[in-house]
Amino acid sequence: MKKYPYQITSLEEYKEAYEKSIQQPEAFWGDIAENFTWKKKWDDVLSWNFQEPKVEWFKGASLNITENCLDRHIESIGDRPAIIWEPNDPEEHHRVLTYKDLHKKVCQFAHVLENNGVKKGDPVCIYMGMIPELAIAVLACARIGAIHSVIFGGFSAQSIADRLLDAKAEFIVTCDGAFRGQKDIPLKSVIDDALIACPFVKRVIVCTRTRIPVSMIKGRDVWWEEEIKKVETLGLKYFDAEPMDAEDPLFILYTSGSTGKPKGVVHSTAGYMVNTNYSFVNAFQYNPGDIFFCTADIGWITGHSYILYGPLSAGATTVIFEGIPTWPDAGRFWDIVDKYKVNTLYTAPTAIRSLMGFGLEPLKGKDLSSLKVLGSVGEPINEEAWHWYDEHIGKGKCPIVDTWWQTETGSIMITNFAGVTPAIPGTATLPMPGVLPCLVDENGKEIEGNSVSGNLCIKQTWPSIIRTTYNDHERCKQTYFSTYENMYFTGDGAMRDDKGNYKITGRVDDVLNVSGHRIGTAELENAMNMHAGVIESAIVGYPHDLKGQGIYAFLIYEGNLEDPDLIRQDIIQTVSRIIGPIAKPDKIQFVTGLPKTRSGKIMRRILRKIAENDFANVGDTSTLLDPAVVEEIIAGKI
Ligand code: WTA
């Protein structure tokens, strides 16, 4: 039975919808958009070109996404839990926020933002742990039309400063600290370090969580709770949702690319809303009343689209988990599934692999019978992990959706639909309606037919496509729309099987996927090169049992190497400072030279083979400036 008018419930329907979405995208998405709340309807569903690029969906329409995520549910399901929050420590009390509660709190915090000078169009940086206030802050920004830019808690002060400078963000919402496993992360103190380089920041709103001592600067820093009290004293309750144009930016999310510094991916309001909702309802086959648990962090796109906007716009109950899967023990996810009778679990292969490593003991006594659908995202899922997930978590009765997508695509692009279209282990399978993938060779020629592989591109626009990179449209054009003419280039390689199913094979550019996190090698090399004594570095990925890819660094070091392990630790410390703990290299090998062509280009292909221990296939080294260096690196391999 269809729970949403646009929910697809059979393979035939999928095929029909897909055909229509490609042949008549305006009619297809226009019909779906009718199911949302608009202050004013659109004049045109779509105009686009990939040359500039310029993409406009639902042009002329006016809306506020929070009215779609909150207000429209109040009458019908106002008492249904919108958010179930599970704290890091299982001994601490959990929290439930109904749609009414969430609406009230978002309105209150929207007043707080306004009272603190935030206006429509202002970028607001959010650096918080996974607590309900993070969701409230994000939605309050959307309510007043400010552009949120959430930064993952694992980034360093330097990374935050880079992002604040790029976005010229004058407002920050943070916490005193965050609990993650056994750690207390001093978020405010990290922000304080970042702000040394950002004197333009006018206001920092600090929410209490860990209550570690924090420095509060007069005139700049205020407590969340005190600001809420002011709003209550003033009797401010309902907050009129700001009318936003369909194409007004909703948020910025920074992501690593193959060159230099991370770029601010900008998403629009209407297209993003319609597409995240549509993909949520269809890929997961969501049923109203189901409990949906996405284990990602809201600091990444998966959290934006499938903890917040997709589920909330569909009136779903979404679980927010503050902690980590392995603390206090490796049964944490299973406890949560059992405790809240979770129906859909959406997680990453890296988490599955790590939990597999603990065996079946942590599953004992956990009732997982509420589960109906499982999901995977972030990296290719290896078959071993897929089967473990299927057998031990899904008990062979839960379809697994393997969802391929990216920060830039905003919503799921290639996936099976749970129980509706066929699942194939390790294969994302078929494109979502509205998505027209293709494979191209190095020369940009499209590879037709089936049983082929190549670089994955998308030929047609879709509603939640990236609109620009913040303040630098040229960079957006160069990165995504210039490699191949008239196509969006994903940076991924893929295979298309004999039936047209897509299997993503991984990045084909210089971007690593470490535990499902994207890290550019250029960014890593810049950070390494900042360490005193490092003359040059080259970073490549190598297969890692848990992380999917590990970070292998080849370094030329001019200092004293008497105690190489200590130097390695120093270098790791530098990388942690510059980028954040998530970018720590796994292996550091000191070398005297790097394999370079005569024109000075580092031959990463060779280094990749060495890092993979595939010495027999390093290939032709005769074009190198100094071929002997390869033997030397192999001999010194750690
Ligand atoms: C990879 C995460 C294989 C891919 C939503 C992509 C995947 C990058 C899958 C985007 C999947 C994501 N199978 N690979 N199901 N999902 N990827 O921007 O390399 O953090 O380009 O978005 O993750 O990472 P991002």
Image (spheres, rainbow, N blue to C red):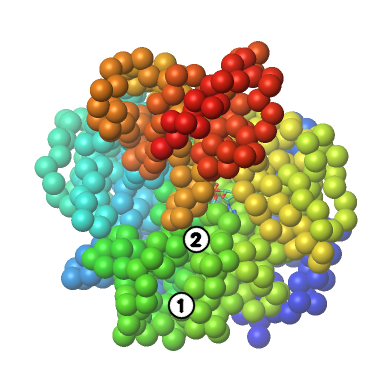
Rendering quarter of residue 213: top left
Q: Along the polypeptide, which appears first: circle 1 or circle 2?
A: 2
Please give the residue where the numbered disc 2 appears in the rendered image: 349
Frontmost residue, 523 versus 605:
605
Residue drawn at (78%, 36%), measured in percent from left and top? 442
Q: Is residue 357 above or below residue 411?
A: below
Name the amino acid type tagged 1: Ile
Apparent side of residue 230 relative to residue 420 in the rendered image (left or right): left
Residue 235 location (% of width, % of height)? 26, 56
Q: Which amino acid, mark 2?
A: Pro
Residue 324: x and y, percent? 32, 60
Res 131 label: none
Secondary structure beneath label 1? helix
Is 537 above or below relative to 27? above
Please report the residue visible at 43 percent of the width from the left and 31 percent of the height from the top.
636
The residue pinned by badge 1 equals 393
Check disc 1: other Cα within 10 Å, few if <14, some if 14-19, many if 20+.
Answer: many
302 vs 53: above or below: below
